[in-house]
Amino acid sequence: MTLNLRPLLSSLLRSRTGAILVALQITIALAVMVNAVWIVSQRIADIEQPTGIDDDHMFVVAIAGLGSGFDLSSALAQDLAYLRGLPGVVAATATESAPLTGDGQGTQLFLQPGQRGRSAALGVIQTDTQGLRTLGVSLIAGRNFRPNEIQPFSKHSLEQSVPEIIVSRALAQALFPESDALGKVVYDGAGRPMTIIGVTHDFMGPVGLGNPKYQTALYPKTPGEYGAYFLLVRTVPGRLDVLMQTAERHIGASNLDRVIFFAHPLQFYHQRMIAENRNMAIFLSAITAMILAVTCLGIFGLATYNVSARTRQIGTRRAVGARRRDIIAYFMVENAFILCAGVLAGCALALATGYWLSVRYDLPRLDLYYLVGGVLFLWIVGELAAWQPARRAASVAPSVATRTV
Amino acid sequence: MLKMQDVSKVYRTDLIETHALRNFSLEVKSGQFVAVSGPSGSGKTTFLNVAGLLETFDTGIYELDGQDVSRLSDDARSRMRNEKIGFIFQSFNLIPDLDVYDNVDVPLRYRRMKAAERNQRITKALELVGLASRTKHMPSQLSGGQQQRVAIARAIAGDPALILADEPTGNLDSLMARQVMDLLEQINEMGTTIILVTHDPELARRAQRNIHVVDGLVIDSAPYERRLGADERAGAGGSMPA
């Protein structure tokens, strides 16, 4: 094939409006496609990630007190005593942050007081000595809370000091990537010290609060600062539905100074989380497919237009010695130049968009393999889009050169 | 140089058949300057297309530079057009997005010549047509006569044995037409065979031979003056094939 790169490029630059528009389309398509595929891959990975808790056998009851006469402390104690006495209940605890629900507390811990030193975002689950058992989370180092370490109910619990905490492995590694976190002291935003007394395997806390989903800590605290709390209950297999209905009925009837907002199996929230991820993945995939289709149509349209507008020129080239494959090569290389310009700008835009998304929405930074894959994919699809017009160009007869109209 | 014997070409559609060439026979020796004339629709352009390997033919024998071209593949025809034939078109057919230099370069690139040799040939061809100082001009910046001279430079840059010119002065005024004809004669004097398709009797008169084509048949092949005399004796319609 005779490619004639220099004259081809100079010819392209002389009639560049259409080419620039298509290159821009390719730029945007690449940036959107790469980042969308990256987000979709994250969402799919999220779907496949284990929660780390025994959510198949857990349910949550959301309760709120009515009026100023509501004695939350005693109601909560009664509820827990009732639930823990039910046959088939493995463990139960009360919290302000139910895992997987999206409701709860997110915060930051620091290695030094005054919000200095390394820090990590985390989700917090307030619990008592049954927290680990209720969640189905096991310790990999350290110990569980002792009864005397559980902070009693306070209307100002946010101001309460929590001297001991249990952290997930992901949070431990985020805070102490090079050493063992057990026994180390960390600080909350107010500069209060907390000693890490236990490290658990990774588990999801109240996700969706801006924290990495496995960075979770258990605080030994009695919930209820806002007059509301969640009851988390873990049952033996096969008893969840019955026990949830029983508990809901009893709790609803036992104290009329409060209301039950809802009672749901934890699987309900897990499935909702999966559905959100799946729907987002489908939505982004559809958007990407549409943008790709429009881009391919743009490439096809420009190539088709160029072939139509240059029929005489193609005939002349054939007359002076171009073979069919030279004509195909001409249009494919011309398209490759446009793709090249679009893809180069697209790489920059994709990286910038990826960076912005990672900063703005706390997403993982764009993996460069996705960028390389996106470039190759778009290149192949873009060249395929120009293939048919190029073949049509090659079929122009050399005798077209002698036609005067 | 060119030998056609009983060459026929029929254009077919669903409804009609048009016999563009009928048993067309012609021999052109190397170095000749031949004019092909005839009324519109007589088959002149079809002859030029077949002779220039721009179109295939249905029956007959066609030898170009001693080679039977009837069974050549499309690629081989392209190569032969590139190496042996130079084309000059009525509408110049310059590529509007390329400057003068690159336009002349087009056939040479398809021959895969080295850059240095191409440069030498382009410079020589442009000097011959008097446009060596206009290499960076775009076709739109040139007059019609200049554009046709660029087309001639493109045709001769590859040093072809045969130049086929299709109404090369059809879009030019008389002064420019004369300059182009002078140039073609000059090229012919250097040994290149030229076949010129024209309506213009004045141009035909300047050729060594004049082929008159009517209804796809060669009805006369003689110097212009001799043919003109025969036509006058035969009457206004000229001689028609049986």
Image: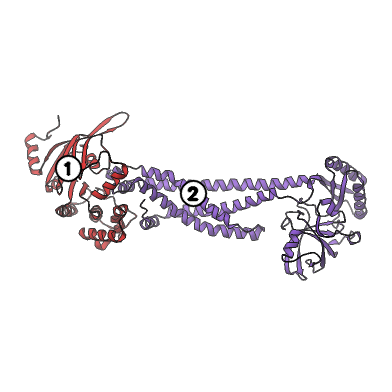
Using the image, determine if residue A379 lies above or below residue A185: above
Q: Kindly report the distance in space between the C-alpha atoms of the residues bearing marks 1 and 2.
A: 50 Å
Mark 2 — on which chain does it sit? Answer: A
**Total numbered badges shown on the rendered structure:** 2
- Place residue B215 in its image quadrant: top left
Measured as percent of width and height from the top left, residue A358 is found at 64, 59
Q: Residue at x 82, y 51 (%)?
A: A135
- The reply to whether residue B43 is visible in this rendering is no
- Place residue A219 in its image quadrant: bottom right
Horizontal arrangement in the rendering, residue A201 relative to residue A5 (left or right): right
Task: Identify the chain drawn in red.
Answer: B
Horizontal arrangement in the rendering, residue A297 relative to residue B41 (left or right): right
* Viewer-nearest of discs 1 and 2: 2
- The reply to whether residue B219 is visible in this rendering is yes
Residue type highlighted by circle 1: Val
> Mark 1 touching mark 2, by CB under 8 A?
no
Q: Which residue is mark 1?
A: B36
Dot 1: few (<14), some (14–19), or many (≥20) neighbours within 10 Å?
many
Q: Which residue is mark 2?
A: A380
Q: What secondary structure is found at the residue carrying circle 1?
A: strand
| Colour chain A is painted in | purple
Q: What secondary structure is found at the residue carrying circle 2?
A: helix
Using the image, determine if residue A123 lies above or below residue B8: below
Horizontal arrangement in the rendering, residue B132 relative to residue A99 (left or right): left
Measured as percent of width and height from the top left, residue B9 is found at 24, 35
Q: Residue at x 87, y 49 (%)?
A: A91
Residue type highlighted by circle 2: Ile
